[in-house]
Image (cartoon, rainbow, N blue to C red):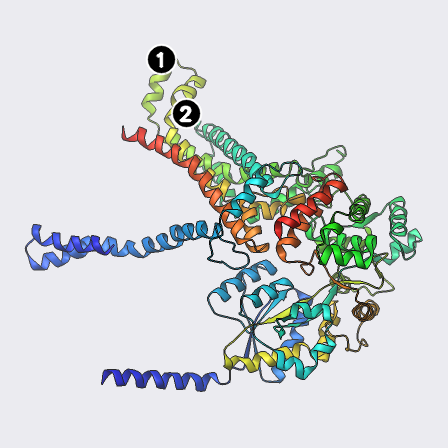
Amino acid sequence: MSTVAETQIKLTPEHDARPGATVRSWLQDLLPKIVLAPSFAATIVFVYGFILWTIYLSFTNSKTFPSYDITGARAYQRLWRWTFESDPPSSWYTSITNMGIFGFLYILICLALGLFLAILLDQKIRGEGVLRPIYLYPMALSFIVTGVAWKWFLDPGLGLEQTLHQWGWTSFHFDWIKNKDFVIYTVVIAGVWQASGFIMAMFLAGLRGIDGEIMKAAQIDGASTFQLYRRIVIPLLRPVFLSAFIVLAHLAIKSYDLVVALTSGGPGGSAWLPSNFMYEFTFKRNEMAVGSASAVIMLMTITAIIVPYLYSELREKSR
Amino acid sequence: MLRKLLIGTALATSFAFSAHAADVKEVQMLHWWTSGGEAAALNVLKQDLAKEGYAWKDVPVAGGGGDAAMTALKAMVAAGNYPTASQMLGYTVLDYAAAGVMGDLTETAKKEGWDKSVPAALQKFSVYDGKWVAAPVNVHSVNWLWINKAVMDKIGGTEPKTFDDFVALLDKAKAAGVIPLALGGQNWQEATMFDSVVLSTGGPEFYKKAMNDLDEESLKSDTMKKSFDNLAKLVKYVDPNFSGRDWNLATAMVIKGDALVQVMGDWAKGEFHAANKTPGTDFLCYRFPGTDGSVIYNSDMFGMFNVPEDRKAAQIALATATLSKSFQSAFNVVKGSVPARTDVPDTDFDACGKKGIADLKKANEGGTLFGSLAQGYGAPPAVANAYKDVVSKFVHGQIKTSDEAVTELVKAIDDAK
C-alpha cells in the first residue's frame, strides 16, 4: 500500500501546481485507499494468511495444538487411503460422496425450481407482491432454524409420518432421516426449501431485465411459449445462472450447520459433509493436521470447479 | 529528561499495578455446567468460595456443550490468557499439561492428603509428571441400568445377573408391548453402552487390556467379536425411531414408562430427580449385568492453569474447596455422581448414590476401576472417537458382521494412534 501512496504523492504536483488544491487532490486520491486499507489488510491476513497457515499445518504433525515441525504428507496419505475405503465406508469416503450427492442435487434442484417458480410468477399474475416474499422468506432463516424445523417435521415419531398415521393413513412410511442410506437426501430437501426462493428472486430479476421488444418480435415470428423460453429467455438468463450457481455452490460447500441441526451427523455419521469432517477432526479428535489437509482438499476442489467456469464466462464477456 | 520521566512513569505504573495485583480475590472459571441441576450444583462451590472472600467469574462461552468451551479454551491458551481453572475431561488435561501451561498444586495436594483419598485411577489424569495439575470434582460411572419400576413390576421382572438374564428380561418387556431398551442412536451413547457390554462379556481383565491398554491381540480376539454380537442382540430391542435421539429423551422414555430400561451413566439419575422420582419406589438402578464389582468411570476435573503469582492464592482456595469433603458431598448429591475421594461419608446420598460410593471404593481397592473408552478416559480423543465411529457404524449397519467390526476397530485404532 505504501508504495502506491508514495507514487501518488510524487505524481500529483505535476498536473496541478496550486498548493491548496494539491493537498486536497492528494487527499482525494488517498482517501479511498486509506478507507480500504484496513479491510484489505484484514482480508490479506485473515483469509489468505490463514489459507497459507492451514496448508502449512497440513504438512505438520499437529494434534491438539498447532505444531510447526514439517513431517511430510502423512495427513494426505491417510485421506487418500480413506478415499477408497467404501465398504465399510470411512468417514472421509462418506463425506466426499455426500458432498457429491448433496452438491449436485442441491444446485440442480434449486436452479430448476427457482427458474420454474420465477417463470410462473412472471406471468403478470395477481398477488405477486404477496407471493414473492413468501417464497423468499426461508432464506432469512438461519440454517440452524431450518435444520431443527425440518428435523421435527421429518422425524417419524413427531412429524409428517406420525400426523398421517393419526389421520388414518397408517401404511404411510417415511423415515429417511433415520436411514443411513437416505439421510443425505433429507439434507437436500431442507437445503432446497431454504434456498430455492432466493434463486427464484434472482431469476425473476433477470426475467424483468429482458427487453420486451425481443419477446414480442419472437411472438410475431410465431414462436410458441415453450420455444420462446427455450430459445430466447433462458439463453438470455445466462449471467443469472452464473451468479446463482456461484451462490449455491458456496452455500453447498459450507453447509455444516444444516447437517448438524438436521441430523446431528446422521446414523453412524452417514450424513457428514467434508466441513463436518474437518471440524470433527480438528477440534474433537485433536488431529489438526488431518483436519487442515481436508480443508486444503476442499479448497482445491472448489478452485478446480469455480476457476475454469469463471474463466470461460469472463473471457466470453471481454470478447 | 524525557527518558527519566518515562522510566519514572513506568516504575510508578508497575508499582501501582503490583500493589493492586497482590490480592486478586477472584477465580476465573471456564465451564459448561449451565443447565438447571448442574448450575445448582456449581452454586455450592461459588458460595463456599464467597465465604472465604473470593469472587467467582464465569468465563463466557458462546454456545453450550463441552466442544464450544474447549475451542474457547484453546484460543485463550494460545493467546496466553489463562483462566484460573477450566472444567476438563480426561486426556485433555494431559494434553495441556504436556504443552506446559498447567499449574502445580502438589503442595496443596500433600497438605490435604489427596494422594491417599483420590482413587489411583483418577490420579492418572490429575497428576502429570509427578505434579498435581487438576482437581477431580466427581466420579461418574457408566455401567448402570436405569429401570422403570412400574414396568418392571408389570412384567414381573427381577434384577438380571447375567447377560442372558438381561436378554430374557428384554424379551419379557417386548412381549408385554413396551419398548424394551431406550437408546439414543448417537455414537457416544452407543459406545457408552458398548463399554459395559465389553466388560460384561470379557470380564475386568479383558476390558483393561482391550479398552485401556489397546492391546491388539485382545481387540481382535473372539471375546471382542462376542462383545459385538452381544451388542447386536441388544440393538434388536430398541424402537425403530432411536437414531439421533438425545440421551435425556431416552431417559424420559424410561421415566414415562414407555420403555423399560436405559443403559447410561449415572448422570441419568439427575433426570429422574428432576421428574421427582425416587430410587427404589419409582425407578431402579442396577449394575449392568455381569459387571458388578467393577466400575467404568469418567470424571469431571478442574484443570488448574499456570496463572501469574498474584492469582495463585485464589487458585489454591478453589482447588481446596473443590476437594473438600463438604463440597464433594453437597455437589455430588445434586449432580448424581459420586465423590472423587473415597473418604466422604455417604449419609446425604440416595440409595443409588450409596451403592455407587461403595462400588467405587471396592473397585478402587480391587483394581477394577477402569476408564471409559467412550467417554475419553480409556485412550486419547483420536482413538476414542475412532472407536465410537466403529461401534456406531456397527449399530447402524454400515459394518455388517462382528468379524468386520473387529477388523475395522483394529485398523481405526491403529490409524488414530
State the quadrant of the N terminus of chain A: bottom left
Q: Amino acid at mark 2?
A: Ile
| Left or right, residue A266 beside residue A9 | right
Marker disc for residue A234? 2
How many numbered markers are drawn?
2
Q: Secondary structure at mark 1?
A: loop
Q: Which residue is mark 1?
A: A221
Residue count near mark 2 (Cα–Cα under 10 Å), binned few <14, some 14–19, many ≥20:
some
Using the numbered discs, state the Cα–Cα distance from disc 2 to disc 1 in whole angstroms. Answer: 18 Å
Sequence order check, earlier mark of 2 and 1: 1
Note whether residue B96 is visible.
yes
Instruction: Give left or right: position of A203 versus B392.
Output: left
Q: Quadrant of residue B126?
A: bottom right
For residue A229, above or below residue B312: above
Identify which residue is drawn at 59% across, 36% down: A84
Pointer 2 chain: A
Indicate the amino acid at tag 1. Answer: Asp
| Circle nearer the viewer, 2 or 1 | 2
Q: Secondary structure at mark 2?
A: helix
Residue A126 located left or right of residue B57: left
Viewer-side residue, B131 vs B188: B131
Q: Quadrant of residue A228?
A: top left
Residue B47 is at least partly visible in this image: no
